[in-house]
Amino acid sequence: MLETHHDPPGKTVPDQPALPPTPITLNGQYCTLTPLSMEHAPVLYEILGGVENAAIWTYIPYGPYADLESFTEYIKTLEKGSPFFTFVIWVPKGSRLPAVPTGSIDAAHARPVGLISYLNIVPEHRSIEIGSVLYSKALQRTTAATEAVYLLIKHCFESLHYLRCEWKANSLNEPSKKAAIRFGFIFEGIFRKHWIVKGRRRDSWWSSMTDEEWDGGIQSALDAWLAAENFDHEGKQKKKLEEFRQGGTVVTKAQ
């Protein structure tokens, strides 16, 4: 690039854009993520659909879905891709989620427990968002739930070469906001009257994480928290994720 006094201010970045997500399996210690397909609709409906799971959709702009037919239409929308790239979260079959790392999960012995997506994918500006997080009751507040987000953050920075990862939430959605801060996302502000969702005004809470923050302590903290030695034989954590980041350079509290 020609450097002249007409060049705009700001730090230059490589010309090559980030890569759009492509169908890939992401393997973790507690869960595995695979690209969503229509064949998953019936089993996903069992854990995410129906009246008994309506509360899962409280802050999602769509749903809930009372029957398989309407839920399948929703899955069809997600599977088409833009603006979503959605993964199914799988864990080993059984009544309980794994309390300790299991290694790679055999598809024949796995069950789905939720969905998680990339969206607002802008490779030319190297920005991407993690959202449309739908965790079944079985997945909520588990180690696998944390690892699913970890796998998407790691993939977007290290394999797809994004510089910014976003996390947005309804400003009334305290669990989502707390989850973002726990992971190390930085609160950026409130977009007032941002959307109208299900006939109600939504103010949107915005946060982000950058590649420097990921490399500067967030990844190492997550790696340490997810390590087998951080959990006892019953799967109870010995140290909180926030404790692993104490003393680091990353500020993670909302203003």
Image (spheres, rainbow, N blue to C red):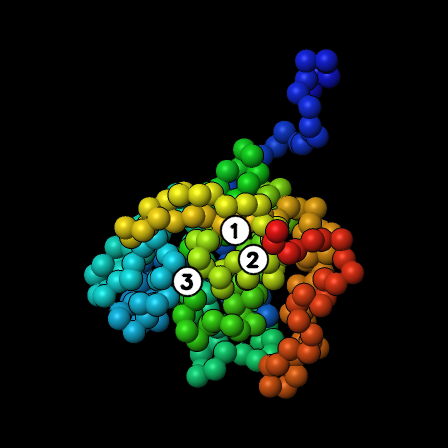
Q: How many other residues sit within 10 Å of disc 3, few (<14), some (14-19) or many (≥20)? A: many
Q: Quadrant of residue 49?
A: bottom left
Picture coordinates of residue 86 (x, y %)?
Answer: 42, 54
Whether residue 34 is situated above or below residue 168 in the rendered picture: below
- Give the residue type at disc 1: Trp
Residue drawn at (69%, 74%), measured in percent from left and top?
A: 239
Closer to the observer: label 2 or label 3?
2
Q: Which residue occupies the extreme right position in the image? A: 247
Picture coordinates of residue 117 (x, y %)?
Answer: 45, 54
- Calculate the distance from the C-alpha at mark 2 to the C-alpha at mark 3: 15 Å
> Which of the two discs, 1 and 3, labels the residue nearer the N terminus?
3
Whether residue 238 is situated above or below residue 250 in the rendered picture: below
Q: How many other residues sit within 10 Å of disc 1, few (<14), some (14-19) or many (≥20)? A: many
Instruction: Give the secondary structure at mark 3.
Output: strand
Residue drawn at (41%, 62%), measured in percent from left and top?
A: 134
Instruction: Give the secondary structure at mark 1.
Output: strand
- Give the residue type at disc 2: Ala
Q: Which sits in the foreground, 24 or 239?
A: 239
Residue that carries the numbered disc 3 in the rendered image: 134
Side of 125 relative to 83 (left or right): right
Picture coordinates of residue 251 (x, y %)?
Answer: 69, 53
Residue that carries the numbered disc 1 in the rendered image: 167
Residue that carries the numbered disc 2 in the rendered image: 180
Q: Quadrant of the N terminus?
A: top right
Whether residue 87 is situated above or below residue 11 in the rendered picture: below
Closer to the observer: label 1 or label 3?
1
Q: Which sits in the foreground, 155 or 234?
A: 234
Q: How many other residues sit within 10 Å of disc 2, few (<14), some (14-19) or many (≥20)? A: many
